[in-house]
């Protein structure tokens, strides 16, 4: 098991029970991103690893979907010096009504960071919005891949998905 997987488990981010995931499926374990993203030692290590995979000469913006990826995106931006943007799941109905907080300009290369993926739908929706505004999704990086089709779905959509930890190979959720 990797150091990051160990830290995620030690932080208590793997919950056992009955849970409904964002895609509507039911599961007997949950990877609670808010547990590992709110622990400075875990967030620091995760952000360091993500930052090490991003070449500042090849990426103009670090982006991620709200709310879960906001701490990750911010921490990686601080480490790399690359500006960041947050992608809303829906249009807000007040203020600027923006779907993107921060800036992604036409032609900018974007690293998209996500916390946990099951099917890959959220990171794909984020990549599609980046493309809609003229950005170029350069890297798609997720902290935990639940190993339930996300990597394959992202690949079928024409992107490569990098993960730090994959359930089964790196992260054993059975011994929690």
Image (cartoon, rainbow, N blue to C red):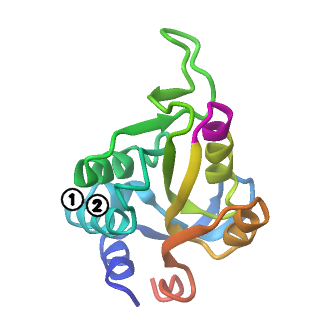
> Residue shown at 21%/59% (left/top)?
40
> Residue shown at 41%/44% (left/top)?
60
Q: Spot the residue most to the left.
A: 41
* Image spot of residue 78 (x, y percent): 24, 48
User: Local crowd at mark 1 within 10 Å, few (<14), some, or many (≥20)?
Assistant: few
User: Local crowd at mark 2 within 10 Å, few (<14), some, or many (≥20)?
Assistant: many
Residue marked by disc 2 = 43
**Is residue 63 highlighted in magenta?**
no
Residue 161: image quadrant is bottom right
> Residue shown at 48%/9% (left/top)?
95
In this rendering, the answer to whether 140 lies above or below 146 is above
> Residue shown at 50%/40% (left/top)?
108
| Front residue of this view, candidates 143 and 37 | 143
In this rendering, the answer to whether 85 lies above or below 111 is above
**Is residue 132 highlighted in magenta?**
yes
Query: Which residues are the magenta region?
Result: 129-135
Residue marked by disc 1 = 40
In this rendering, the answer to whether 29 lies above or below 137 is below
* Image spot of residue 155 (x, y percent): 72, 67
């Amino acid at each position: 098991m990797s150091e990051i997987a160990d830290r995620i488990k030690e932080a208590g981010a793997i919950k056992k029970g009955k849970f409904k995931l964002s895609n509507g499926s039911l599961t007997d374990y949950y990877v609670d991103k808010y547990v590992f993203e709110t622990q400075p030692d875990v967030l620091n290590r995760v952000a360091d690893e993500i930052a090490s995979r991003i070449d500042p000469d090849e990426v103009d913006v670090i982006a991620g979907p709200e709310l879960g990826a906001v701490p990750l995106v911010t921490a990686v931006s601080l480490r790399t010096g690359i500006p960041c943007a947050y992608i809303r799941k829906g249009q807000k109905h007040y203020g600027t009504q923006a779907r993107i907080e921060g800036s992604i300009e036409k032609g900018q290369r974007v690293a998209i960071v996500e916390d946990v993926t099951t099917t890959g739908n959220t990171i794909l929706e984020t990549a599609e919005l980046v493309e809609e505004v003229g950005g170029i999704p350069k890297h798609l990086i997720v902290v935990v891949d639940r190993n339930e089709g996300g990597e394959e779905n992202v690949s079928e959509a024409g992107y490569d998905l990098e993960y730090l930890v994959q359930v089964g190979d790196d992260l054993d959720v059975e011994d929690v």
